[in-house]
Amino acid sequence: MNFNGLSIEQAPPISAPLRFYLTAPLFAIIAGFLILFSDTTVLMSRYSIDSIIITHALTIGFLSFIMLGSLSQMLPVLAGVVIPKVDVVTKASHGLLVLGTVFMLLGLSYDNSLFNTISILGLGTGFLIIIGVISIAIAKVQNFTATVKAMATSLFFVFFIVLMGLFLLYSYIDDSYAYLRPLIANIHSVWAIFGFGGILIIGVSFQVLPMFYVAPKFKQFCKKKVVLLISIGLFMWLGLNLFYDSYSLVAKAWIALFFWAFATTVWKKLSARRRPISDTTVWYWRSSSIFLTLGSFLWIFDEYFKNEYIVMVAILIGGGFIMSIMIGMLYKVIPFLVWFHLNGMGYMNIPTINEMINKKLAKTQFILFIASLIGFIFAFYYPMLLKISAISFILSMIILEYNIIAPVLIYRKTKKTKPDFDMNAFTTF
């Protein structure tokens, strides 16, 4: 691995990101059971309550938790800044987001205004606390790299995504705003997928691919211009969608073009890496490139089918692209964090990063996850596949949770023993 350009001494406590990582698969398991007991015809509509509940169990409960945990960990390491009281902030934000997500799922399921109100307070406060603190930290960054710029841009989009989400949730309390749901929900979902998830992944990949996979570095044009061009495309799409909807296809093609270019670049980088050893994480990156390419083009051509395939687009991009990379990164990041923190405390006789997760289980989890996504897509034509795919998805998430817990247990068990070296001897007085 290549640690050049990292400020490892600024790393936050391991508990800061781990609390988000350990919780995320639990919400994905809940989403899997909700799919299992749902109906294909209901899920084909993006505006059905079942679809909304399942979507947010995955987007808030799984994707946002992993992204926020990663931001709390990676920003100090990549930019060399300290997030103020990071342990307190992540504890408070995590607790509020768990509370808000649970009550949102219950509130929408039972059309309960009290639950929805608690959810608005929990989600709103939880998101704004961590977004605000991380934004303050970014404002102090002196070395504004391409990755840090992408993080800052994604935080800009997520701020407005959260506000739109809170408004949409409030519209289920006060029905007088219900007429605005389709318009706001469309902007909310596009900015969430491409503005928050997509841009953050692109920015992090600038650092992660060369670091973990010894892949060639990204060209300067890609690092300096792509995030800006995608952002321009998202604002262009917003304006056209609001005032000249018939021309919004132009902006969609603009956005999709750069994401397709990113997918192609990732595939090439992985093929050109100096140590072409394949593992589950490489498979996740490669499969995400395929899903992103298919999803981007389907998103464009869905205009001609009056958004008939928009749920399929969400499966391809949200599940196949964003979730795939998130899972793949968990398999790299969590063992690295455990190894790094134990090594920093003077433990030398510990498993290597590649030994902390059972490779056969990781491979099984990958197969079950990809099979579930493919099954969900074909369930539109063969409804019998929905329940089989849901079971496959649930099993994959249970295995993922186990694979996350395993390195954490190694960390806890090792900490109970005496370090090989007393690191206090190196403390400067």
Image (cartoon, rainbow, N blue to C red):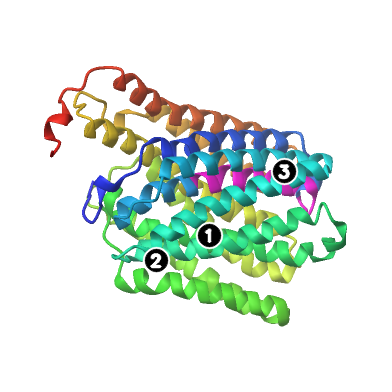
Provide the residue designation for mark 3: 118
Give the residue furthest to the right: 176
Provide the residue designation for mark 1. Answer: 196
Q: How far apart are marks 3 and 2 (CA)?
A: 34 Å
Point out the stretch of residues depicted in magenta. 44-66
Q: Quadrant of the C terminus?
A: top left
Q: Which amino acid does label 2 sit on?
A: Lys
- Please provide percent x and percent y for residue 72: 42, 48
Which residue is most to the front? 429
Instruction: Please tell me in which quadrant of the rendered image residue 182 appears.
Output: bottom right
Q: How far apart are marks 1 and 2 (CA)?
A: 13 Å
First in sequence: mark 3 vs mark 2? 3
Type of secondary structure dominating the magenta stretch: helix
How many angstroms separate mark 1 from mark 3 (CA)? 25 Å
Residue 100 visible in this rendered orientation of the protein: yes
- Image coordinates of residue 14 in percent, x first then y, are 37, 36
- Crowd band around label 3 with a 10 angstrom C-alpha radius: few (<14), some (14–19), many (20+): some
* Residue 267 in view, yes or no: no
Verify whether residue 47 appears in magenta. Answer: yes
Residue on which the image places disc 2: 149
